[in-house]
Image (cartoon, rainbow, N blue to C red):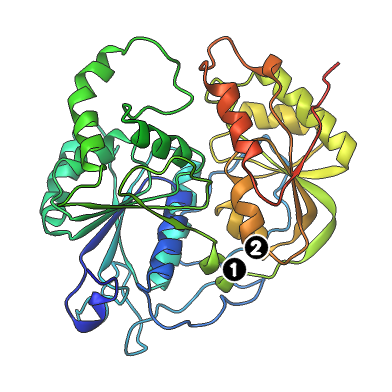
């Protein structure tokens, strides 16, 4: 099936399911690469313009210092084939479908306010590219999953291609049992994509890397048939093609799976180049929140890195807790910035430090691509084994070391001493 079929009036009927801002960003990168968009409208407008209309504001964080001088993504006119203004639901004024090659992005909205705020902003960018966006309150109560899946069943059965950002998601795995699509695409959900590809190649059950090993819990056992069905559907066959679109290194390619490189060409075309500051910025991680890293050890490591490298700003991960960020601000003196878009877009717009410090995470792979040619250096600090909690998965240290060791175009820092 040609990705440009939507140009002829026979839409591709491509459904994309996303649950995080980064997943939606990578759907836009995938669609851009495959030509599911209008001719290049040029870069997004300059700094200082009004924010995108209709985006939910991020929740206030009273305990934190004000955010740094990060300009909002400026507003854009909604583009249609005739140059008119599209409605908020993604339809053009004359009732016809939006441009975008028949791509509909379905947001399975989480409950976390920070994630919802970033998703609203990303949804506006997707509409500005001409794609339909369908917002589902998928976790809005005990009956919400049934209503969401029931409402999407018809679309799923008609879809010719399904794009997903998180194959580990139980929501997505349930939806996969309904679809008859011949083409399945997995776009990056960060470093988890590396583990997904490896598990698929080895024929293992799909389980997130930070989950502790051992016996399955009652919910896992109940859901096991659905998970097994999802794994079978994500295995290429004579009736089904599978593509993985990733900026991560893929060393174990499952037989029959097409791996396509994500080089963030859409991000580089739409944003920047950024203004570079003299100092260093640091990128936060949610390893404490997921129970992998001890909170006190993490805070001490951040303090040491900031003092050593002259860091002034800390870009918080959307899942970092307010309590932890308050401690960081109080005890390290760092200015805490809670971005309202994925960091790849924020960094590409600038201002951004000449050096970006990070612990092992997705950004050590994505930021060098998004910032290619700017002169910004990305430096990564390994997680010392003594920082891990007793509840951390036995696989955690090896996985995190692999994230760092396989990153390209980054500077590897020596281990941080907390003594």
Give how far apart the Cα atoms at labels 2 and 1 are.
7 Å
Q: Which residue is mark 2?
A: 348
Q: Is residue 235 visible?
A: yes
Q: Which residue is mark 1?
A: 268
Q: Position of residue 391 (x, y in %)?
A: 53, 12
Q: Position of residue 270 (x, y in %)?
A: 56, 72
Q: Position of residue 351 (x, y in %)?
A: 74, 61
Q: Judge whether 213 appears above or below 137 on screen.
A: above
Q: Locate the N terminus by quadrant.
A: bottom left
User: Is residue 119 found left or right of 4 in the rendered image?
Assistant: right
Secondary structure under badge 1?
helix
Residue at 57% in and 73% down: 269
Residue 77 has which mark? none
Q: Locate the C terminus by quadrant.
A: top right
Secondary structure under badge 2?
helix
Q: Earlier in the sequence, mark 2 or mark 1?
A: 1
- In the image, 62 versus 283, the foreground residue is 283
Residue at 60% in and 13% down: 389
- Callout 2 touching callout 1 (CB < 8 Å): yes
- In the image, 63 versus 350, the foreground residue is 350
Q: Residues within 10 Å of mark 1 (few under 14, many from 20)?
A: some
Q: Judge whether 293 appears above or below 95 on screen.
A: above
Q: Residues within 10 Å of mark 2 (few under 14, many from 20)?
A: many
Q: Position of residue 381 (x, y in %)?
A: 74, 34
Residue at 77% in and 26% down: 301
């Amino acid at each position: 099936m040609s990705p440009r079929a939507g140009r002829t009036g026979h839409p591709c009927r491509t459904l994309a399911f996303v649950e995080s801002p980064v997943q939606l960003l990578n759907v836009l990168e995938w669609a851009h690469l495959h030509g599911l968009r209008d001719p290049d409208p040029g870069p997004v407008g300059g700094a200082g313009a009004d924010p995108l209309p209709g985006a939910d504001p991020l929740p206030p964080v009273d305990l934190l210092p004000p955010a740094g001088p990060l300009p909002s993504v400026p507003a854009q006119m909604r583009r249609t084939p005739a140059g008119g203004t599209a409605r908020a639901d993604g339809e053009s004024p004359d009732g016809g479908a939006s441009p975008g090659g028949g791509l509909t992005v379905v947001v399975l909205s989480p409950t976390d306010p920070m994630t919802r705020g970033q998703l609203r902003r990303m949804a506006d960018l997707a509409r500005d590219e001409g794609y339909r966006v369908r917002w589902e309150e998928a976790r809005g109560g005990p009956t919400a999953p049934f209503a969401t899946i029931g409402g999407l069943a018809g679309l799923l059965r008609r879809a010719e291609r399904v794009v997903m950002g998180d194959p580990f998601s139980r929501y997505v795995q349930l939806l996969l049992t309904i679809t008859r699509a011949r083409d399945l695409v997995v776009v990056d959900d960060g470093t988890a994509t590396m583990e997904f590809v490896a598990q698929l190649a080895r024929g293992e059950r799909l389980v997130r890397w930070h989950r502790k090993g051992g016996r399955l819990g009652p919910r896992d056992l109940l859901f096991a048939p659905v998970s097994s069905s999802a794994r079978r559907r994500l295995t290429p066959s004579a009736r089904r093609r599978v593509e993985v679109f990733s900026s991560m290194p893929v060393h174990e390619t499952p037989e029959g799976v097409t791996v396509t490189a994500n080089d963030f060409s859409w991000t580089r075309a739409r944003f920047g180049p950024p203004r570079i500051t003299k100092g260093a910025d640091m990128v936060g991680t949610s390893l404490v929140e997921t129970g992998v890293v001890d909170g006190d050890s993490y805070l001490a490591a951040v303090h040491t890195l900031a003092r050593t490298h002259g860091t002034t700003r800390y870009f918080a991960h959307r899942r970092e807790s307010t309590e932890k960020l308050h401690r960081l601000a109080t005890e390290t003196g760092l200015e805490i910035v809670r971005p309202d878009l994925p960091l790849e877009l924020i960094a590409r717009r600038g201002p951004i430090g000449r050096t970006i410090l990070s612990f092992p995470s997705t950004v050590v792979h994505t930021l060098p691509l998004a910032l290619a040619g700017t002169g910004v250096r990305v430096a990564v600090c390994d997680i010392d084994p003594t920082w891990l909690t007793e509840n951390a998965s036995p696989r955690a240290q090896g996985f995190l070391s692999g994230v760092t060791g396989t990153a390209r175009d980054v500077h590897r820092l020596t281990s941080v001493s907390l003594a």
